[in-house]
């Protein structure tokens, strides 16, 4: 086995070195993968990106349209995007903020836009219809409900984030 | 939809849905009239963009047509309209602040040539919103009729 005066054999030495180098190489490969995998968790939470849109006192059971501006970044190009929301309280008193973007081809729906159906959302483009809670009405072009904004109630004001698709 | 590569492709494949062309129409000037022309351009452009934003699923916003005198503008507008109609756009609508087009046969919605700069952000937003609503009402009327 070991020669006199030496505690590490040639074989052991090689094993240690190769394991060490191999370990480094594996780490170089794996660490970016792990980074990619957990990236969504590391991203800044959306809470800070919410925009103040209206006073909670002004929200009624009748949907109202509010327009607000939000800084958006598309690749390296940062711009101010105008967004709209239909805000109302449902029968349980919960605040709902619907995105007006029709899930068919992206026109903006209006509440009571069709005078014969005053309590529905109506898309003027291809006559899509939605219930007051945003559910698409079968038999009309849209195939999914209107998106709902992430919302937060703070200091008497409503803050809205990004629209979340409803399935 | 906007006049860019991605939307143009989409509008071709969805032509049965995207059947309306919105065309801003503005007069050019390079003398002391330039400021006023630029101001009307701003309003026309803002209204056209807002209309497209609200009706993007059925409308294509054409690049703004500019002209030096009203007859030439009319000729150009006519040519664009004919071409677009042949290509399958069932509705073509012009937006302009030049009331002289009233003397011609052209589907134009007029917006007053007001200076947005003199207004507060809130005021100009409301005004552009109101004009866009007029355009949208006109278009929905046409769509309903067909």
Image: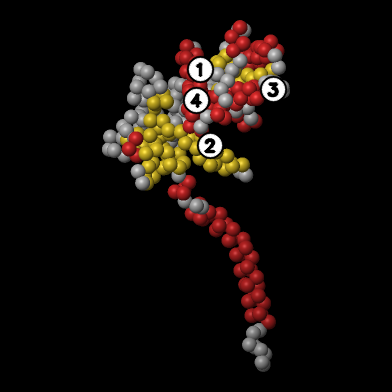
Query: Considering the numbered disc 2 on the image, is that residue within a helix, a strand or a loop?
Result: strand
CB-based contact (under 8 Å), mark 2 and mark 3: no
Query: Considering the numbered disc 1 on the image, is that residue within a helix, a strand or a loop?
Result: helix
* Mark 4 closeness class: few <14, some 14–19, many ≥20 residues within 10 Å: some
> What numbered label is drawn on residue B32?
3
Q: CA distance from mark 1 to mark 4?
A: 19 Å
Q: Residue at x 54, y 41 (%)?
A: A72
Chain ID of residue with mark 2 = A
Please give left or right for residue B102 compared with residue A40 in the image: right
Q: Residue at x 59, y 18 (%)?
A: B96
Q: Are marks 2 and 1 on the same chain?
A: no
How far across and down, in percent of the image, does residue B57 sit?
A: 52, 26
Chain ID of residue with mark 3 = B
* Residue indicated by mark 1: B139
* Residue indicated by mark 4: B127
How far across and down, in percent of the image, does residue B130 sit?
A: 48, 23
Chain ID of residue with mark 4 = B
Q: CA distance from mark 2 to mark 3?
A: 34 Å
Q: Residue at x 62, y 61 (%)?
A: A29
Please give left or right for residue A81 compared with residue B32 in the image: left
CB-based contact (under 8 Å), mark 3 and mark 1: no
Label 1 vs label 4, nearer the camera: 4
* Mark 1 closeness class: few <14, some 14–19, many ≥20 residues within 10 Å: many
Front position in the image: B101 or A123 = B101
Question: The C terminus of chain A lies in which quarter of the figure?
Answer: top left
* Residue indicated by mark 2: A81
Which residue reaches farthest bottom?
Answer: A4
Q: Earlier in the sequence, mark 1 or mark 4?
A: 4
């Amino acid at each position: 086995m070991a020669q006199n005066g030496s505690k590490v054999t040639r074989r052991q030495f090689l094993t240690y070195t190769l394991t060490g180098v191999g370990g480094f190489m594996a780490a170089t490969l794996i660490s970016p993968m792990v980074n990619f995998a957990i990236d969504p968790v590391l991203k800044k939470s959306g809470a800070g990106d919410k925009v103040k849109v209206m006073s909670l006192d002004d929200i009624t059971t009748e949907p109202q349209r509010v327009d607000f501006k939000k800084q958006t970044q598309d690749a390296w190009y940062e711009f101010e995007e105008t967004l709209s929301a239909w805000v109302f309280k449902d029968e349980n008193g919960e605040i709902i903020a619907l995105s007006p973007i029709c899930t068919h081809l992206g026109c903006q729906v209006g509440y009571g836009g069709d005078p014969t159906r005053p309590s529905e959302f109506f898309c003027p483009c291809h006559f899509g219809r939605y219930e007051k809670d945003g559910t698409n009405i079968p038999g009309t072009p849209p195939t999914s409900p209107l998106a709902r904004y992430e919302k937060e109630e703070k200091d008497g004001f409503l803050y809205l984030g990004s629209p979340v698709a409803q399935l | 939809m906007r006049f860019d590569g991605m939307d143009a492709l989409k509008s071709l494949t969805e032509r049965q849905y995207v059947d309306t062309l919105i065309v801003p129409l503005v007069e050019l000037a390079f003398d002391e009239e330039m400021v006023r022309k630029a101001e009307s351009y701003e309003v026309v452009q803002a209204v056209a963009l807002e209309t497209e934003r609200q009706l993007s699923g059925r409308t294509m916003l054409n690049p703004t047509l500019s002209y030096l005198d009203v007859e030439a503008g009319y000729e150009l507008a006519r040519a664009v309209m004919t071409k677009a109609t042949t290509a399958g756009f069932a509705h073509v609508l012009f937006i302009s602040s030049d009331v002289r087009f009233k003397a011609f046969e052209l589907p134009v919605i007029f917006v007053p040539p007001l200076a947005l700069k003199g207004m507060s952000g809130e005021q100009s937003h409301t005004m552009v919103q109101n004009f866009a609503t007029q355009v949208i009402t006109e278009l929905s009327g046409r769509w309903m009729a067909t």
